[in-house]
Amino acid sequence: MESMEFIIRSYEGESDRAQVEDLERRCEVGPAESIFLFTDTMGDPICRIRNSPMYKMLVAELDKELVGVIQGSIKVVTVHCHSPKDLAKVGYVLGLRVAPHHRRKGIGASLVQRMEEWFTSNDVDYAYMATEKDNHASVRLFMDKFGYTKFRTPAILVNPVNHHSFRISSDIEIARLKIEQAEAIYRRFVGSTEFFPNDIDSILRNKLSLGTWVAYFKGDSDFGSDGQVPNSWAMLSVWNSGEIFKLRLGKAPFSCLLFTKSWSLIDKIFPCLKLPTLPDFFDPFGFYFMYGVYHEGPFSGKLVRALCQFVHNMAAKSKDENCKIIVTEVGGRDELKHHIPHWKLLSCPEDLWCIKALKNEGRNTFHELTKTPPTRALFVDPREV
Ligand SMILES: CC(C)(COP(=O)(O)OP(=O)(O)OC[C@H]1O[C@@H](n2cnc3c(N)ncnc32)[C@H](O)[C@@H]1OP(=O)(O)O)[C@@H](O)C(=O)NCCC(=O)NCCS
């Protein structure tokens, strides 16, 4: 590693904000030939971590210039085969950026190392991160240099919001749950799902969480106060990510541009076809993130679809006209993805999650965990999107 005079220190909101936002604008994430999204944090660079129970942002400074940044958050989640009670403290690494002219000088590695030290000082069991599997720089940095291993490959499903509302089947009832009821149902039915956050109540109570809805067939039993549930039912919650940051397409292959243009042209010429319009992604846009999607019973796939349509209609009618996509992320082997409407063109079939055990005690059973096939379901925390 080349010796340089850069220092790593904590982010200071007042003085660092503008430089960090500028750095974000200058950094393209992922391979040069693929679609690239810019994140506009709207004056609050720590907006992606500030809703987590513990968080930290570090910056690398060289001659008074900010040349690197990294964020991390800590929480307690369900991790199978981990004692006691299958709960573990995990640290999530995100937002690693190094200024293009200062790459390959060890700055990225120093930022990761300091973030891991912060995790260790807070008794974190496992550090994990998510990246595009084609992002070779990031994959090599974490896997080759720091010993992270491939953990899970959930699918990111994206559906555009368009001005045509969906008609929800008349035999389906959709009801909103109170926060206490949603928490109880999540703990009972989803609590054992991998990476289920122990502080689900604070997620549900957060102002970005727009609510939790259940769907079931009319005439089937209702959600009783005695804990009774219908034969077939589905639930999900919605998080308004667009409230804290916006996305903007930075660069897209020509084929994608052509597709966007011709699609909206067809829609203008033939509005009666009710084609889903592909929104203009070159202006900053927000999105809703559907989390905690769960279903049970013989016909519950149809109920999941109805809930997704309900969320779509909610986004289409929302006062925030900038909500242009609905996003969700589900376990790679989860059959849920067959029931959640999404566009393949906009979705990512394999988001690569890598993990590393930070404690080397004998009781750490993580290495056995990696050898087991991924569980079908994975809870993706809306605070980490
Ligand atoms: C990924 C990134 C943060 C790396 O920062 P960096 O300061 O250049 O990384 P370092 O100099 O500390 O490199 C450490 C190791 O990472 C790997 N690495 C870094 N850049 C690489 C590249 N372009 N190609 C292949 N391996 C690379 C190497 O193993 C390297 O070790 P080496 O130099 O001894 O071979 C930087 O390329 C970047 O900001 N990319 C854009 C944003 C991004 O993709 N972030 C990751 C999102 S998860």
Image (cartoon, rainbow, N blue to C red):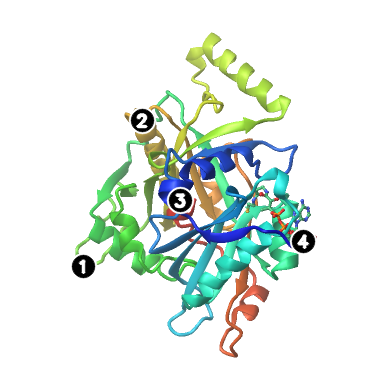
In this rendering, the answer to whether 165 lies above or below 245 is above
Instruction: Name the front one of labels 4 and 3.
Output: 4
Dot placed on the residue nearer the N-terminal end, 2 or 4: 4
Q: Secondary structure at mark 3?
A: loop
The CA distance from mark 2 to mark 3 is 20 Å
Which residue is under mark 4? Answer: 2
Which residue is under mark 3? Answer: 48
Q: Amino acid at mark 4?
A: Glu
Instruction: Name the front one of labels 2 and 3.
Output: 3
Dot placed on the residue nearer the N-terminal end, 4 or 3: 4
Does mark 3's beta carbon lie closer than 8 Å to ligand 1? no
Which residue is under mark 1? Answer: 226
Q: Amino acid at mark 3?
A: Arg
Instruction: Name the front one of labels 2 and 4.
Output: 4
Q: Is residue 145 left or right of residue 383?
A: right
Asked whether 374 or 124 is in front, the reply is 124
Residue furthest to the left in view is: 225
In this rendering, the answer to whether 93 lies above or below 214 is below
Residue 61 is situated, as x and y percent measured from the top left of the image, at: 59, 53
The CA distance from mark 4 to mark 3 is 31 Å
Dot 3 crowding, Cα within 10 Å, few <14, some 14–19, many 20+: many
Residue 173 is situated, as x and y percent measured from the top left of the image, at: 29, 44
Residue 81 is situated, as x and y percent measured from the top left of the image, at: 54, 81
Q: Dividing the image into four equal quarters, which quarter contains ligand 1? A: bottom right
Q: Amino acid at mark 2?
A: Asp
Which residue is under mark 2? Answer: 320
Instruction: Name the front one of labels 1 and 4.
Output: 4
Dot 2 crowding, Cα within 10 Å, few <14, some 14–19, many 20+: some
The CA distance from mark 1 to mark 4 is 64 Å
Dot placed on the residue nearer the N-terminal end, 1 or 4: 4
